[in-house]
Amino acid sequence: MMKSARILPFALIALCFASASALPAERLATIPLPTNFTPPAGKLVFQDGDTVVFLGDSITSQCLYTQYFEDFCYTRFPKAHLHFHNAGTIGDRAGDTLARWDADVAVFKPQCVSVLFGMNDGNFTDWQEPAFEIFQKDISTLLERIAAVGAAPVLLTPTMFDSLPNRLNDRMQEPRDKAYNEVLKTYGAWIKEESKRRKSAAADVFAPLDAATADRRRTEADWTMIPDTMHPNPTGHVLIAAAVINDIVFCPPVSEILIAKKGDQWMGTVGNGELSELTTAGSAIAFTFTAQSLPWVLPPETDEGRKLIASAFKKPLQLSSEKLAVRGLAPGKYELKIDRESVGQWTDAELAAGINLGENPKTPQYQQALKVALLNKDRNAKGEHPLRIEWARLKAERHVLKAAEDANESPARLEQARKSFERFLEPNQKAITEYVATSRQQEEEIYKASVPLPRKYELSPVLSGDK
């Protein structure tokens, strides 16, 4: 059974929004925040130093949805210093993980383990009841293993299978290509029901992939985000990460700033940050704001996926809300500068309603978060992804040895197979240790880069003739 939601001490302060009365400009420093905030029921809140393990098959070992999820946590919870470990292996079914459980999962002492299987478990054919029963049994065993190490499980539904690439290239494989996506949908329905029965967290990653694909094909019939029928490209992995964040993780706004005029006095109220040095000069307003988190920004190759989120989930998701509202301005258009760089122009009405800066690439906060995302992309490329290749090689060598043992080879040949495995094992284990160390070392650099900095905001009217 999943642990109850865990509330991080800084979440009680930094992730809630001010209900305290605003202060006059000349007295304004840090706005006090309430300390009785509780995340929504069923949402995970990580504690400082928690470790998250992503357990799965080759879709997980692509190190993409996991990377994008990590980007969210690094920037939204920079004080938490979470640790992440990818434990996906090519070709795995749920039961295959038991052979590597101790060395690839339990050794990291995780507080949370996500589980994504199903693509291989259904045997790439039409419905097979025995295969489904094995899947149910193996998932149940995994949940018992997760509970035994004191971690909270997060069950993910299988991702979708897209037969279109095969049809377009005249390489249809039957009955798989007509039936398999429905098989995976049924597996996913059981995952959701089982999570409810066990009261564990779950994310539906099938639905947004399926919905976005159907929506896009209304205007582009041959479009796909799964070019080999099974493995999503970065576009698909963005939707998987968004589903996990939206369905199971406490997702507070990045920050909120409200500057309002009462009578002849300007006042400020903020959430998840500190505001100081509020000054006015005519119609111009300036202040310094230090947020306690950064927006969710991903590498450039994910741009298409970000644009598809609204259609995939049938609504916009507020995964990166960084709101600024200024009320009481004289009618007209205003330019906002942050750290002396212009980030855009808005009317007084737009500013009064509030603007979201979380998706604005011109802000220094966005650029800082992009740097974090690129550092994490490098961490995955140099540590996590080659680590998964070594685990895949180990799996293959184990299969070779087991085949020799099962074939009743002669003692001499069996001894030769065992020595070959031993020769492989020593450098393999050394490489695994080194990749884990590389990943952890780069993680420290990421946290240094993710510390939010004080930013100087300047809002001034756009004069007639100015662009």
Image (spheres, rainbow, N blue to C red):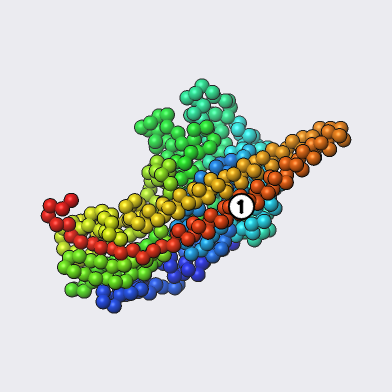
Residue 292, percent from left and from top: 41, 65
Q: Residue at x 47, y 41 (%)?
A: 234
79 or 151, nearer to the observer: 79
Q: Identify the amino acid type marked 1.
A: Val
Residue 118 visible in the shown view: no
407 left or right of 456 in image: right
Of all residues, the one furthest to the bottom in this rendering is 27
Q: Residue at x 41, y 58 (%)?
A: 294
Q: Residue at x 69, y 48 (%)?
A: 429
Q: Residue at x 59, y 38 (%)?
A: 119
Residue 277, percent from left and from top: 29, 72
Residue 418, percent from left and from top: 80, 40
Residue 421 visible in the shown view: yes
Circle 1 residue:
436
Residue 366, picture quadrant: bottom left
Mark 1 nearby-residue class (10 Å; few <14, some 14–19, many ≥20): some
- Quadrant position of the N terminus in the picture: bottom right
Of all residues, the one furthest to the right in this rendering is 411
Residue 270, picture quadrant: bottom left
